[in-house]
Image: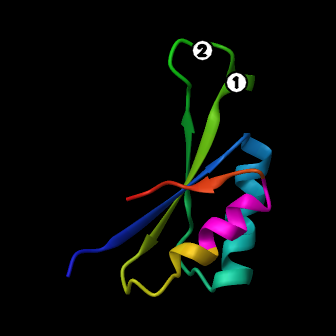
Amino acid sequence: MSDVRHVLVLPGRDTAEEVAGELAERFGVTEEPQLVRDALAGEDDAEDAQWLVVVEDPAARLDSAALDAFAAEYEGWLEAP
């Protein structure tokens, strides 16, 4: 079985950092999530960038629906695999 990776898309860096910190508390994530800046096509302004929080889930124990609902609390969403 391959490792599962969840990608949460969030509207800004501060939000992404907050979500990354909250993941351990809410979902028991033990590995540090990876934050990635995702510049929108044609946008040079960092303010217009979305931020991705990449969560490794080797045991495939995180619930996608719960992660999506969690991201929605921060005006984000869970990217479909």
Q: Is 24 or 68 nearer to us in this picture?
A: 68
Number of numbered discs overlaid on the protein picture: 2
x%, y% of residue 52? 57, 48
Report the quarter where the N terminus lies.
bottom left
Which SS does the magenta portion mostly show?
helix
Mark 2 residue type:
Glu
Q: Secondary structure at mark 1?
A: helix
Magenta stretch, residue numbers: 67-74
Name the residue rendered at 50%, 19% in the picture: 41
Mark 1 residue type:
Asp
Question: Is residue 46 found left or right of 29 in the rendered image?
Answer: right
Question: Is residue 60 found left or right of 76 in the rendered image?
Answer: left
x%, y% of residue 27? 64, 83
x%, y% of residue 37? 57, 36
Q: Earlier in the sequence, mark 1 or mark 2?
A: 2
- Asked whether residue 68 is drawn in magenta, I would say yes
Question: Is residue 19 found left or right of 66 in the rendered image?
Answer: right
Name the residue rendered at 63%, 86% in the picture: 28
Q: Secondary structure at mark 2?
A: loop
Q: Do tag 1 and tag 2 residues touch (Cβ < 8 Å)?
A: yes
Report the quarter where the C terminus lies.
bottom left
**Callout 2 environment at 10 Å: few (<14), some (14 to 19), or many (20+)?**
few
Q: Can you tell which mark lies on residue 48?
A: 1
Q: Which residue is mark 2?
A: 43
Q: Quadrant of residue 56?
A: bottom left
Q: Is 68 or 62 nearer to us in this picture?
A: 68
- Asked whether residue 70 is drawn in magenta, I would say yes
Name the residue rendered at 69%, 51% in the picture: 76
Question: Rounded to the nearest whole Å, what is the CA distance between mark 1 and mark 2?
Answer: 7 Å
